[in-house]
Amino acid sequence: MAHSVTASAGVKQLSPPEPFSSRNHRNLSLLFLRMPMKGQPLAPGERELALGWTEANDFRVLPGLREDYEITRLEATGRWGWRNREELWAQAALMNRGGGFLDPWITGWHRDVLGWTDPNRDAAKNGEVVLQQDGRYSKRSAWGISDVTLGWTRSLGPTTSVSAAVKLPTGSASDFLGSGNVDLGVSIDHLHKFARSWWLHGQFGFIAQGRGSHLKGTRGWADQGALSLLWKPNSRDVWIAQWQTERAPVTTVAPGANATHRLLVLAYRRSVSARETLELWFSEDRDVFNGRWPEGANLGPDIAVGITWKRKF
């Protein structure tokens, strides 16, 4: 895609930025389909490959529930321009649930930057791996392929697109790498320019969740949404501030873990060539407000960081 287009008056206008797509990396949420944030489809015959790495550290101790682990996720996304104004896409990932390396960094972040600490996290050993719900499951480390998603996107105009997707049960449900069932989803995305270098992007999606084969309490449906502020000061750089929300995928024995999941995300995208881009990002959960503003940020990993490389062909 060209970095800019020229208006008839001779003034260079910045081309619209692609939305930034991320998801909540709580292990239970990763078992189910969530629709990616989408922009305009690729042109017929055009292709894109995206390779992403995410490191997400989660810690949660509630009555009857303990979640203490770090997710390493390597995701590949392929996009294919199909017919006019339509594209096909697919996502697959390798996922590892382990101890990770972020525990001491997060403790320091809470203490030195946010100005508070979590007594439960302070008392836990660094590198523990626990995913446990009383009377339902107890999981430790695991790795393998996740569920695979196949999708379709169609343009409804220069600023709006609609998508549909199906998630296939390719991951190990017994290891909580997949749900063991099929999910279906639809979403609509809209991009609005309100100043020369500024855009707003919004998404709303709806997911029909198949019942988890090894997980009690699966919700039959989940809604999701996102609102993003994008600043594109030049043809190569894009800065993104994003708020995203989704319904909890399951009902657990701990009411405190069943609330709506919300994250705050900051991302930076750099065009390194006419066809290649790099994205750097991190997300925060309710800890950024010490749990005092769940409408702004609520359940999710304490911190997730990632990098994604994309190339068009």
Image (cartoon, grey):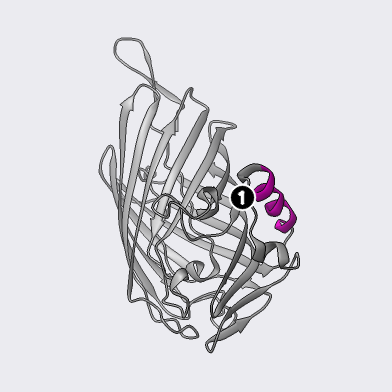
Q: Nearer the viewer, residue 190 or 168?
A: 190
The answer to whether 210 is drawn above or below residue 260 in the figure is below
Q: Is residue 209 left or right of residue 146?
A: left
In the picture, the quarter occupied by the N terminus is: top left
Residue 147 placed where, x, y %? 50, 71
Q: Residue 232's x, y, as percent?
A: 45, 27
Q: Is residue 231 above or below residue 224?
A: above
Secondary structure state at the residue bearing disc 1: strand
Q: From which residue to which does the magenta span run?
A: 102-112
**Which picture quadrant has residue 164?**
bottom left
Q: Nearer the viewer, residue 52 or 121?
A: 121
Question: Badge 1 is on which residue?
Answer: 305
Q: Is residue 115 left or right of residue 11?
A: right
| Residue farthest bottom in this picture | 135
Three-letter code, disc 1: Val
Q: Is residue 263 above or below residue 73?
A: above
- Which residue is at the far top? 9
Q: How many marks?
A: 1
Of the pair 49 and 260, the residue shown nearer to us: 260
Q: Residue at x 45, y 78 (%)?
A: 252
Label 1 neighbour load within 10 Å: few <14, some 14-19, many 20+: some
Q: Name the residue at 55% across, 68% down.
A: 27
Q: Is residue 207 visible?
A: yes
The x, y position of residue 241, in whole percent, is 46, 39
The answer to whether residue 147 is visible is no
On the picture, is 259 further left or further right than 139?
left
The image quadrant of residue 43 is: top left
Where does residue 248 sit, x and y in percent of width and height? 41, 68
Q: Is residue 130 magenta?
A: no
Q: Nearer the viewer, residue 305 or 251?
A: 251
By secondary structure, the bulk of the magenta-drawn segment is best described as: helix
